[in-house]
Image (cartoon, helix red, strand yellow):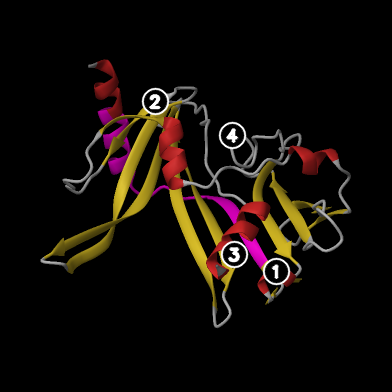
Amino acid sequence: MIRIISACIWMLSVSHNCFHKGVKSGTSQSIRAVRVSAAIPMVLPDTSYVITNSYEIFYRDDLILYKFRYRFDSAFNGKWVLQEFRPNIFVFEKDSLYGYSYYPRPDRSISDGRIAIDSVWAKNAVTPFQFDTLLKSKPIATYFDSQKNWVKVYDYPRVDTTSEKFTYYLYYSKKLFGLTDCFFSRSNADESGMKLFKVRIVAHGHFYQQYKMILPERQFLYEMLELPLIDTGEVMKYFDHYKKDVAK
């Protein structure tokens, strides 16, 4: 029951990052990469912890590559013999409905192949949060932080006077302008010349009478950071692999 409480509060306030559109680069070999990460606090009667998740996205012209991780479990005679995280590569073209999923390490339970993009997002990411209602209201504050990011602060509308209060901090940067995605920009949240790259949500704490439980103040964080490219060999390999599969 307590886990259900935490999950419900999470779904009311947050969602995770996923990207629909890529970046148009100057040359076919130009690649740009970002890491999307999330940190979700969970509170139980006897403990608290933070769930973290991240994945990388690579852009080359109209091609987009996601690099996810999934948990691989292997059992023999009812005992676990191997538990580890393995990579899952998914490649598609901007504005397509389908892409190709690849598993670099052999796994008999799943296989490479064509798959609907929406199915991949449903499996690997939380449904994107809609900022439409939030952005139609006037921010309670705006300012530039120490990194010269523009910050807009909103109080999320409360259901009633007994519900928990949430404050949203939306961070914009000129450095990431040009990247387009479905989580941060689905509701046209970008500003002129600036990219929304971080969402910080502060839950101010609340006593839930129905569950006889107090949830303390906590913070949800979603962020997109650009990555330096050191070795693009693997990425190029799967971009080329995808082009061959599409041409079949």
Residue type, label 4: Thr
Residue 190 drawn above or below residue 108:
above
Q: Position of residue 154 (x, y in %)?
A: 82, 52
Asked if the residues shown at circle 1 and circle 2 are in contact, with their CB atoms under 8 angstroms apart, the answer is no
Between residue 216 and residue 131, name the one nearer to us. Answer: 216
Q: Earlier in the sequence, mark 1 or mark 4?
A: 4
Question: Could you say which disc has been placed on residue 180 in the image?
Answer: 4
- Does the magenta portion include 19? no
Kindly give the residue lying farthest to the left in the view shown: 77
Measure how far apart labels 2 and 3 are at the Cα level. Answer: 33 Å
Horizontal side of 54 relative to 224 (left or right) equals left
Q: Mark 1 points at which residue?
A: 210
Measure how far apart labels 3 and 4 are at the Cα level. Answer: 31 Å
Question: Could you say which disc has been placed on residue 98 in the image?
Answer: 2
Q: Can residue 189 be seen at all in this image of the molecule?
A: yes
Q: Mark 3 points at which residue?
A: 6
Between residue 214 and residue 100, name the one nearer to us. Answer: 214
Residue 115 drawn above or below residue 137:
above
User: In the structure shown, which secondary structural element does the residue marked by tag 4 occupy?
Assistant: loop
Q: Given this view, does label 2 or label 4 mark the residue nearer the observer?
A: 2
Instruction: Please report the bounds of the magenta region as a residue range.
Output: 219-241
Measure how far apart labels 1 and 2 are at the Cα level. Answer: 44 Å
Q: Which of marks 2 and 4 is nearer the N terminus?
A: 2
